[in-house]
Amino acid sequence: MAAELTGRKIKFVDTTLRDGEQTAGVVFANHEKLEIARMLDELGVDQIEVGTPVMGGDEKAAIKAIAESGLSASIMAWNRANIEDIKESLDCGVDAVAISISTSDIHIKNKLKKSREWVLEEMAKAAEYAKSQGVYVSVNAEDASRTDMDFLIKFALEAKKAGADRLRFCDTLGILNPFKTAQMVEELISKTGIEVEMHTHNDLGMATANALVGIEAGASHVGVTVNGLGERAGNAPLEEVAMALKYSLGYDVNIKANLLKEICEYVAHASARPLSLNKTIVGENIFAHESGIHADGVIKDPSTYEFLDPAELGLKRKIIIGKHSGTASVKARLKEYGIVVDEDLAKEILDEVRSMAVALKRPLIDRELISIYKKTLNFNRKAV
């Protein structure tokens, strides 16, 4: 049921190991970082941003190990607009560097205590040096969403002139909406011709939407994290963006959907951030149906309430027996145990199911349903 494919491929840049680990309170062990990188590579991610080498110690050791592990994905390290930072990245053996510097006036004046001219000069020096060393270069416009548009265009043109392969458009505070995103990204690309990566945060709950709109406006890359980890409210989740691109917008996505659940669960464990039951794409209950109308439709034809086969994501459909169930669910579940009941008996069983579900404040397990069936059947026999 996917949308008609556009034929356009979008490159995924996963930053779980960098921005994701910057989630307050999250630390990955080095062996976890290596395992996550391997899983991302198997998943089909195009580029993995693995960390910040200038931190040294375990951080640099983990980055070196990933760079030397023979993955197919490009391995990128994060840097300030600083040649010494870039040297540390090169020492790790990565094939790509991200060079990040603030572009909004509020950052330039209040954080950097510098000028726009200084920002352009430092970015250009760092980008030119990195490019001279033969690596792929992404220049990151931090706080791009609050940057004066004329200056952002100038920044992108200077980055391109310095040899940058792309510009990372950062909605650092997650304040954009899809309408503004489309306007900014379309203007940026049309006036500079530079490749753009969307890097969106979720402070207003629009990270995925803004990433998708940026792609529709011409961005060729999208920055994501597994489970939406990241600063504050997090980043656009890899699993959401990948499946939305495929099923909502019709893009050709190379991400192996059947591996999403495994990596989401691994990262949830490694980050000590458990997945909710209704977590988009990979939650245990996203293919669970209790409402009588919904369950009846799914039993007759899964496409009535499911736009993709759960098996594609390594999940299973579940018909929940509880307060909101209907007779179709009761009959279907009992049939799994070789028990066939007519509509009248199913209605009697359903009355007891609903009563017990309210008393227990939860759905019923199969054993409880069968117990109600036996009780109802015996009652009816005695009545006769």
Image (cartoon, rainbow, N blue to C red):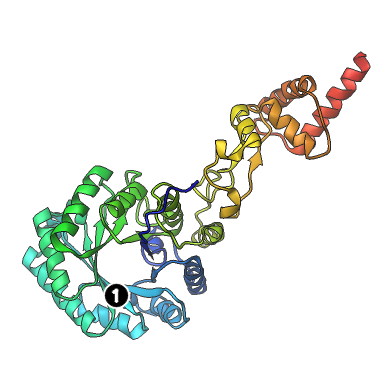
The image quarter in which residue 220 lies: bottom left
Quadrant the C terminus occupies: top right
Which residue appears at 63% of the width and 33% of the height?
Answer: 295
Which residue appears at 27% of the width and 44% of the height?
Answer: 178
Number of on-image labels = 1
For this view, does 360 lie left or right of residue 238?
right
Q: Nearer the viewer, residue 253 or 84?
A: 253
For this view, does 90 lie left or right of residue 318?
left
Q: Position of residue 377 (x, y in %)?
A: 87, 24
Is 282 located above or below residue 97 in the figure?
Answer: above
- Determine which residue is flagged by label 1: 97
Which residue appears at 32% of the width and 76% of the height?
Answer: 96
The image quarter in which residue 382 lies: top right
Mark 1, other Cα within 10 Å: few <14 / some 14–19 / many ≥20: many
Residue 115 appears anywhere in the view: no
Is 51 located above or below residue 324 in the figure?
Answer: below
Q: Nearer the viewer, residue 40 or 21?
A: 40
Q: Secondary structure at mark 1?
A: strand
Query: What's the amino acid at mark 1?
Result: Val
